[in-house]
Every structure is written in C-alpha cells, then in structure tokens.
C-alpha cells in the first residue's frame, strides 16, 4: 500500500510546499491486539 502527503514546514513558514511519497506497511496480530505500522520514504524503500 502506498500513500503520499503534503508538508509545508509549518504555519507561517517561507518553505515551499512539496509532495513526499511514502511506502506504508500494516501488520496486525489479532491474538495480542497489536498493530504495527511501518512508514518509509518511497525513495528509500
């Protein structure tokens, strides 16, 4: 599953908005109820 997001450096920032793509992986352990979410920048995966 892949996603993306926008970042603008915060309110009032002079930084130009840029799109950052991410690779997102979800793993659920139904017995323990644990959910593990791993997020990596797409250019690093």
Image (tube, grey):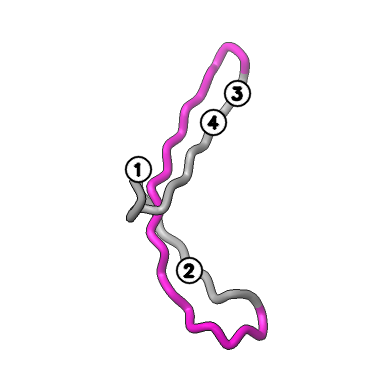
Q: Residues within 10 Å of mark 1 (few under 14, many from 20)?
A: few
Q: Position of residue 38 (x, y in %)?
A: 48, 39
Relative vertical location of residue 43 with respect to residue 14 in this rendering, above or below: above
- At x 62%, y 84%, the residue is 13
Distance Cα–Cα, label 1 vs label 3: 19 Å
- Quadrant of the frame with the N terminus: top left
Image side of residue 42 versus residue 28, left or right: left
- Residue at the spot x=47%, y=27% of the render? 27
Mark 2 or 1, nearer chain start: 1
Q: Label 3's element?
A: strand
Q: Residue 1: give its label.
A: 1
**2 and 1 marks in contact (CB < 8 Å):** no
> Observer-nearest residue: 37 or 45?
45
Q: Quadrant of residue 9?
A: bottom right
Residue 6: image tag? 2
Q: What's the mark number on residue 34?
A: 3
Secondary element under disc 4, as helix, strand or loop, is strand
Earlier residue among tags 2 and 3: 2
The stretch of residues the image draws in magenta is 11-32
Vertical position of residue 9 compared to residue 34: above or below: below
Question: Could you tell which of marks 1 and 3 lies nearer the N-terminus?
Answer: 1
């Amino acid at each position: 599953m892949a996603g993306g997001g926008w970042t603008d450096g915060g309110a009032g920032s002079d930084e130009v908005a840029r799109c950052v793509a991410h690779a997102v992986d979800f793993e659920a352990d139904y017995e323990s109820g644990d959910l593990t979410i791993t997020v990596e920048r797409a250019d690093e995966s």
